[in-house]
Image: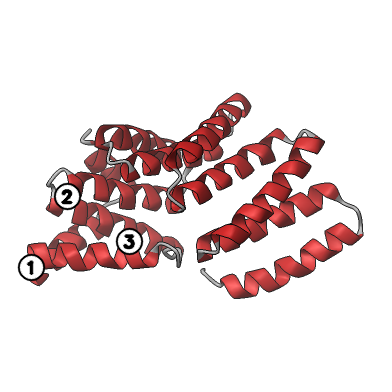
Amino acid sequence: LGKYATASKYLEEALMIWRTGGDKHGTARALISFAWVALRSGSYPLARARLEKALAISRELGDTRSIGFELAGLGEVALRQGNYRVATQLVEESLELRRGLGNKWGIGVSLGILGWIAMREENWDRAMALLGESLEVRQEIGDLSGSAWCLERLAAVVEARGQTEKAVRLLGAGSGLRASIRSVIDPSDTPAYESKIRSWRARLGKEQFVATWDEGRALTLEQAVDYALER
């Protein structure tokens, strides 16, 4: 629920316990969790350092599932820092590993990050294809938070194509999904999210914006996916 400071405190304690006990699997898991909190809070150098340490341990242990997670995390760090070439290489490697494992949750995550990279590069067709595939995977496995994440980014893609009303409906649909599971926007993403809302409200006018947003919030996940992908 976004209580990252509390999570960091407990993770520090867990990391110390695993390290003291010489448990490499536990240490790697704690480092991954710590990196996730740092990434979501916008502490990118710390997230990268934790993920690189975890990746070294996972490679030593031959833990392919964890390697896929760590590569994707490092890719997201590179994305957020504007290094799209490195981000793409890391995430594509993670996707290959996750496809090999049949890890659908991981596949959905890696596809989503690749779609986000395409957004940053303003390659809207590639972004739509990758985010759409990610959304379908996440719908299939019932990942509501991940589905909301995809809808929010697909909203930006369709807005870039001049479809502001559709963008607002998709953003509203994502908001509705998050509300149903008490999921929050990551602190590192909140400024951009709020900026989009202000911009699109100004473009449509307050009354039309609210009405369109509410239409999106009323959509079921299946309806939202069909609407986003024009099925």
Q: Which mark is residue 168?
A: none
For disc 3, the neighbor class at 10 Å (few under 14, some 14 to 19, many from 20) is many
Task: Kindly identify the amino acid type of the residue bearing the numbered disc 1.
Answer: Gly
In the image, what residue type sits under mark 2? Lys
Q: Which kind of residue does numbered mark 3 sit on?
A: Ser
Q: Which mark is residue 175?
A: 3
Q: Closer to the camera, 188 or 215?
A: 188
Mark 1, residue position = 205
- Identify the residue under disc 2: 166
Q: Is residue 144 visible?
A: yes
User: Horizontal placement of 159 versus 115: left or right?
Assistant: left
Mark 2 residue crowding within 10 angstroms, few (<14) / some (14–19) / many (20+): many
Decide if residue 104 is in sight here.
Answer: no
Question: Which quarter of the figure has residue 204?
Answer: bottom left
Q: Secondary structure at mark 2?
A: helix
Choose the circle earlier in sequence order: 1 or 3: 3
Q: Which residue is nearer to you in this view: 82 or 209?
A: 82
